Image: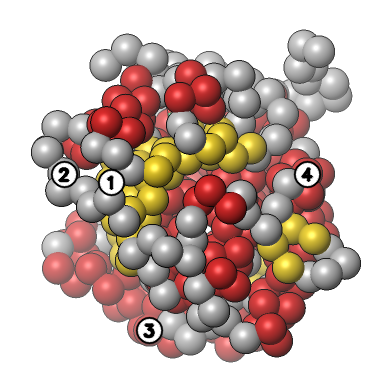
Amino acid sequence: AMAEKGNYRHFMLKEIYEQPETVGRTMTNYVDEFRLSADAPEGLGFAKIDRIIIIACGTAYYAAMVAKYWFEQIADIAVDIDVASEFRYRSPVVSQDSLFIAVSQSGETADTLAALRYCKDKGLRTAALVNVMTSTMAREADIALPINAGPEIGVASTKAFTSQLTALASLTLAAGRARKTISRDAEIRLTRALTQTPRLIKEALLLDESIEAIASDLSGKSSAFYLGRGAQTPIALEGALKLKEISYIHAEGYAAGELKHGPIALIEDGTPVIVIAPYDTLFEKTVSNLQEVASRGAFIILVTDETGAASAKDMADEIIVLPNSDSFVAPIVMSIAIQLLAYHTAVARGTDVDQPRNLAKSVTVE
Ligand code: G6P
């Protein structure tokens, strides 16, 4: 069926609001909610491989970057990630014991497809994590992994991103079990955390109006920085990408620890800095980076959870308080805030949110 906007002003907003449902749907492909464990197709060979290579472009690449943290920490497996346009031309060294995963909403992005073909030619086992199961990548990979997010019409990806994350989180848990790197107790705790995400996303969506108010301040700015640490670093990068794609405000995402190696030179009075920092083991470190920019006049928008807010609320000019979640799934929950922030900023600036200038939904030529 043709996608309809319904009562939403834009497809992007509709797709943001679909996420409790789409994330839940993604999970049904991988997670057994009763047994509290995740399954992955045998053919991925998680028990045997010694490395995963994940290749993607754009937003899908940031999903891959989150997955690197997950697979390394939970399944103790080395992960290489790269953007497809670099990977395909740098003569990458790939070993036969590696699993290649292409991540692509459309399954048609030319560079990602070329990377898939490169690894297939080298004899690697290949998988494609796609939204469109009839796509070229789904057909050509040894294994097609669905996200089932339904048609995504907004050029700026939202629900496909959180579904990619959900599928990759599930695959991580399956890999952890196959490789015996997590105990049954840990598996239960992490799987349960994952199954809570639709509810947490629903709660996050209740922040819509308060984020809209913050966006009206951001919409008058000409540039912004996004900071994160660990698995929140890719969310900072994705937040900056979303903002530039649809609001045309110049935005850069950084690993918070890299700030003092250059970008801090750009902080002036009023420069917006969006800090993504749920309360986890890296929280204090990120907060100290927050203080470094705050003392140079930055306008701080802190995106955190309830526990983080209780401990750092006086340090920010604006604060977005998401529900507490297990740090495993916090990147998925935090995503909702950066999507709504970009969306409302773009609407306040009057841009064409669903069809931003110069961008295509999928880039099928180089
Ligand atoms: C285009 C879109 C992005 C998307 C990227 C990768 O640039 O505008 O939203 O993330 O392509 O697309 P894919 O279909 O491979 O995920």
Q: In the rendered structure, which disc, 1 or 4, sits on the residue that comes first in sequence?
A: 4
Q: Does the CB distance between marks 2 and 3 fall below 8 Å?
A: no
| SS at badge 1 | strand
Above or below: residue 330 compared with residue 129: below
| SS at badge 4 | helix
Q: CA distance from mark 1 to mark 3?
A: 27 Å
> Which residue is at the front of the view, 297 or 172?
172
Name the amino acid type tagged 1. Answer: Asp
User: Percent x, y for residue 242?
Assistant: 47, 39
Q: In the rendered structure, which disc, 4 or 2, sits on the residue that comes first in sequence?
A: 4
Q: CA distance from mark 2 to mark 3?
A: 34 Å
Q: Residues within 10 Å of mark 1 (few under 14, many from 20)?
A: some
Q: Does the CB distance between marks 1 and 3 fall below 8 Å?
A: no
Quadrant containing ligand 1 reads: top left
Q: In the rendered structure, which disc, 2 or 1, sits on the residue that comes first in sequence?
A: 1
| SS at badge 3 | helix
* Residue under pointer 1: 82
Q: CA distance from mark 1 to mark 4?
A: 28 Å
Name the amino acid type tagged 2. Answer: Pro
* Residue under pointer 3: 285
Q: Residue at x 87, y 67 (%)?
A: 34
* Residue under pointer 4: 25
Name the amino acid type tagged 3. Answer: Lys
Q: CA distance from mark 2 to mark 1?
A: 10 Å
Above or below: residue 203 compared with residue 1: below
Tell whether 2 sits left or right of 234. right
